[in-house]
């Protein structure tokens, strides 16, 4: 069942979203650098959330132990923020994070480039980010969920990359994963109709090679089957009369 939010609920999600945006857009870019390990970033995130009177949504969710997904290079999503995972020049790292504030959730992800990478890898990150905004533009009243995925898939494949199919976007609100599911691929006009005051987490995950993934022995970390590098961007949005409002950005 798709939950239509009240204006008051969206305002609470907006507050959560601003807190998460400040973390991902303003604070983490200053510390996600060569020589830094996943454990230290996890600690930083937890300290930030405590200061903001927020709860790390992911920690404890279905048994997951951490506040963030820390996914490096061929890791698509659900990578662990471990002390042994030290960032080095040429890495591409995706950080996915959920923040709960006064019972309402914001979910967002960014991919960061460490040092210098080949132009094709820059292109992967840029295309994934751009596809997110292209998909968001389709989240308007009267469109279908399939319109979002179709837009993302068409753009990504035009750039020579592949959309991961195993993982999808979703509704979000008081729960991390609500209906509807939002694939990053599909056909126009398919799926539920988009209505005012839906709140959605749109999150393309893209690989340089195959869209197929494997799960590592830890039971969580998803990696590209061909071990090509991957990128991941995500925003939580609200559908309004005037179009989609991105809740997890600063401006």
Image: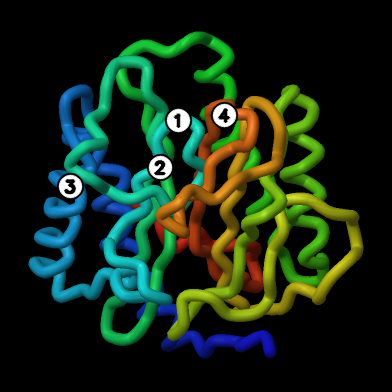
For the question of whether residue 247 can be seen, the reply is yes
Q: CA distance from mark 3 to mark 4?
A: 23 Å
Question: How far across and down, in percent of the image, does residue 66 sit?
Answer: 27, 62
- Which residue in the structure is indicated by mark 4? 227
- Residue 39's tag is 3
- Which residue in the structure is indicated by mark 1? 73
Residue 207 vertical placement versus 239 (above, below): above
Q: Residue at x 55, y 70 (%)?
A: 238
Mark 4 lies on a secondary structure that is loop
Q: Residue at x 15, y 75 (%)?
A: 53
Q: Residues within 10 Å of mark 2 (few under 14, many from 20)?
A: many
Q: CA distance from mark 2 to mark 4?
A: 13 Å
Question: How far across and down, in percent of the image, does residue 93 sit?
Answer: 38, 34
Q: Residue at x 13, y 51 (%)?
A: 44
- Which residue in the structure is indicated by mark 2? 71
Question: How far across and down, in percent of the image, does residue 20 sit?
Answer: 31, 59
Disc with the residue nearer the chain's start (3 vs 4): 3
Disc with the residue nearer the chain's start (3 vs 1): 3
Q: Nearer the viewer, residue 15 or 152?
A: 152
């Amino acid at each position: 069942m798709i939950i239509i939010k009240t204006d008051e609920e969206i305002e609470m999600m907006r507050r959560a979203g601003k807190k998460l945006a400040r973390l991902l857009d303003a604070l983490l870019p200053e510390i996600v650098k060569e020589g830094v390990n996943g454990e230290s970033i996890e600690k930083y995130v937890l300290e930030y959330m405590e200061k903001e009177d927020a709860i790390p949504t992911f920690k404890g969710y279905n048994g997951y132990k951490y506040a963030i997904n820390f996914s490096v290079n061929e890791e698509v999503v659900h990578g662990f923020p471990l002390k042994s995972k030290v960032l080095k020049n040429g890495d591409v790292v995706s950080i996915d994070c959920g923040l709960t504030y006064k019972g309402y959730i914001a979910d967002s992800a960014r991919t960061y480039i460490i040092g210098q990478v080949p132009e094709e890898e820059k292109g992967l990150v840029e295309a994934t980010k751009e596809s997110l905004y292209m998909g968001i533009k389709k989240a308007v009243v009267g469109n279908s969920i399939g319109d979002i995925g179709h837009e993302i898939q068409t753009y990504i494949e035009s750039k020579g990359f592949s959309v991961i199919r195993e993982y999808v976007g979703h509704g979000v609100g008081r729960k991390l994963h609500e209906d509807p599911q939002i694939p990053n691929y599909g056909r126009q006009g398919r799926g539920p109709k988009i209505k005012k005051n839906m709140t959605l987490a749109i999150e393309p995950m893209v690989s340089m090679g195959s869209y197929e993934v494997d799960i590592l022995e830890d039971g969580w970390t998803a990696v590209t089957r061909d071990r090509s590098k991957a990128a991941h961007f995500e925003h939580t949005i609200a559908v309004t009369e005037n179009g989609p409002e991105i809740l997890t950005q600063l401006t």
